[in-house]
Amino acid sequence: MGSPLRWGIASAGKISHDFVNAVGTLPAADHQVVAVAARKLLDAENFATLHGIERAYEGYQALAKDPNIDVVYIGAVNNAHYELGVLMLQHGKHVLCEKPLCLNEGQSKRIVKLASERNLFLMEAIWSRFFPFYRQLRERIDRGELGEIREVEVEFGFVLSDVDRLRLKSLGGGTVLDLGVYTIQVCLWGFGGKAPEKVVSSGVTNDEGVDLEVTAELHFPGGGIGRMKTSALRQLKNTAVVRGSKGSVTLHDFWCPQLLTDVDGKELVDTLPNARHPFNFTNSCGLRYEAEEVRQCIVAGRLQSASVSHVDSLLIARIQDQIRKQVGVVFPEDEQFAV
């Protein structure tokens, strides 16, 4: 592909701002954001003005129908992911969808099937896995430097109990979908993508019936355990420790790590480039890594990424469903999209 990958942006919220800002640090010869859509035209226009984007649309149909877009980034609220993903795929667009891919495994299976049928690229935006320290950790594990992996211990928590996208069932809220996707994926990363044999969890829910704090254990074949905790009620350590028979590695700010404590106890530090605008969230410039992964996959004709495969996303969705069921969190979509 000699010309740049042309991005359309679905939703003009905070994460979309950070994504476009991060893409702006990549070569313009490789990436170009050409259109943005939001439910309100003014939101899309303001976003387009700030980021120097040519076209702004009211509603998502117009974005889906725009013939000059190769791939759409979906940064909308959780419960809109399935509908928007389907819309874009039906109009021949490749899709990078914010995590969680969908609300449950049933929706996720349907959208993966549609992407395969349409011969289009689809990836859940688990940006963590494209950070250099995730790559290095994977290589260390594969080379046997940590020995046999026995445990991944991870916690992820902030005071978020007043944030609508987290506390409201109508928006697909709860820590399992919002934070748990990160803790689950790092457990799977440590254990090489194997599926756990058993999931045991407990949690605290609010009046909406949405989980605000969850503790879970993923029991893997061979006796390995992933121990995870998510919280919207308090700040946690937000580290992931991967322990093997020969040593351990710690990822600090594990979902977007710029600091790693290595097997020998040494601390390694990474950096990110400066962008045009301030970011809303921690280390969001690292969203550039997943954007470049998408470009490389599409250029090579790959329909999925080896680092966040469809199998990975479906497994994460299944584990999320199991945890939600055990904690007592039910969405209307669970019955509608039963597996």
Image (tube, helix red, strand yellow):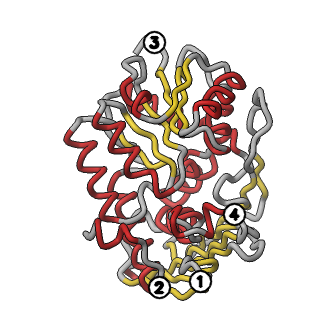
Q: Residues within 10 Å of mark 1 (few under 14, many from 20)?
A: some
User: Looking at the picture, which amino acid does disc 1 mark?
Assistant: Thr
**For the residues carrying marks 3 and 4, which lies nearer the camera in this image?**
4
Q: Which residue is drawn at 37% across and 42% down?
A: 122
User: Disc 4 and disc 2: Cα gap in Å?
Assistant: 21 Å
User: Disc 1 and disc 3: Cα gap in Å?
Assistant: 49 Å
- Where is mark 4, residue-wise? 163
Tag 2 and tag 1, C-beta contact below 8 Å: yes
Closest to the observer, 146 or 152: 152
> Is residue 262 shown left or right of residue 242?
right
Circle on res. 187 = none
User: Disc 2 and disc 3: Cα gap in Å?
Assistant: 49 Å
Q: Which residue is drawn at 37% across and 49% down?
A: 83
Which of the marked residues, 1 or 3, is nearer the chain's N terminus?
3
Image quadrant containing the N terminus: top left
User: Disc 1 and disc 4: Cα gap in Å?
Assistant: 15 Å
- Where is mark 3, residue-wise? 3
- Where is mark 2, residue-wise? 328
